[in-house]
Image (tube, grey):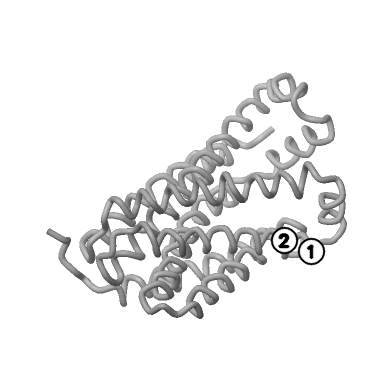
Amino acid sequence: MVSQGAIVGLACAALISLVAPIIAYFVCRGRMALPGRNIAIGAGVFVLFVLVLEGAMHWYFLSHNPVTSAWLRAHTWGFIAYGAGAAALYEETGRYVAMRLFVSRVGEPGTAVSYGLGHGGAESILVGTLGQTQAMIMALLLNAGLLGALLGGRLPHAALLKLQAALTKIDLPLALMGGMERVWALMIQIGCSLLVWRAVARKDLRWLAAALLAHFSIDSVAGAAQRGLLTIQTTEAVVTAIGLVLLVFYLIRLPRRPLAG
């Protein structure tokens, strides 16, 4: 059984993931111009480069190709490097291409922040809100004794048992941490957008390299937790620390500027 506290926590996490980008938009809107075009481009690039292109690569290397999938399962550090490298490459490459070719340039920091809100907002909603909602529905089905009947024909028995075990381990603090993780991830996406925009505006690819390195480093921590090298609590603490530092930096350093027009 999944506790009622865990289910409430999952519902709260889904709500946090949904409203965080909206709150961030209105906070930033009083400080700078935020073109809707850039927000839409950021969201579209996340879907194309992460969900479609990166997802297709993961399908091939982790599922379809038996040689690569077996190697990555057997080599922990190889798996971590692959996952973190793929995330950094696709997200930062997509960010750079979009900022070079498609965004509306309204100067610093509005150009980058508006793109980051779109990119990070799409991630927060599609990964956070939908993911937490799915987990909550599965928890309710498990408590009702219906999860096995609904998924038994679609998942191998071992995978179903693993899913059930994962659901029963969720508690209220862990669920809420999942929601707050989306807030900190949004801060990180805005930070990477500021770095990449600097690479575009100054024609200096060292800033792009910095964004790639930062993204790779953060995702390596998440990959280490996925493979059991770090606890979830340690990973959340690292991401929370990074997110809080960035949040304080944004509140202090991002200038107040009137909206364009």
Find residue 205 and report its horizontal and vertical position in percent: 49, 77
Q: Is residue 15 above or below residue 188?
A: above
Q: Is residue 260 left or right of residue 71?
A: left
The residue identified by callout 2 is 82
Q: Is residue 63 above or below residue 98?
A: above
Q: Is residue 229 left or right of residue 6?
A: right
Find residue 174 and report its horizontal and vertical position in percent: 60, 51
In the foreground, 183 or 257:
257
Cα separation, mark 1 vs mark 2, equals: 6 Å
Q: Secondary structure at mark 1?
A: helix
The residue identified by callout 1 is 78
Q: Amino acid at mark 1?
A: Gly
Q: Residue at x 62, y 51 (%)?
A: 54
In the foreground, 171 or 46:
46
Counting the numbered discs, the total is 2
Q: Secondary structure at mark 2?
A: helix
Label 1 crowd bin: few (<14), some (14–19), many (20+), radius 10 Å: few
Furthest-left residue in this view: 261
Q: Residue at x 30, y 51 (%)?
A: 37
Q: Amino acid at mark 2?
A: Tyr
Marks 1/2 in contact by CB < 8 Å: the verdict is yes
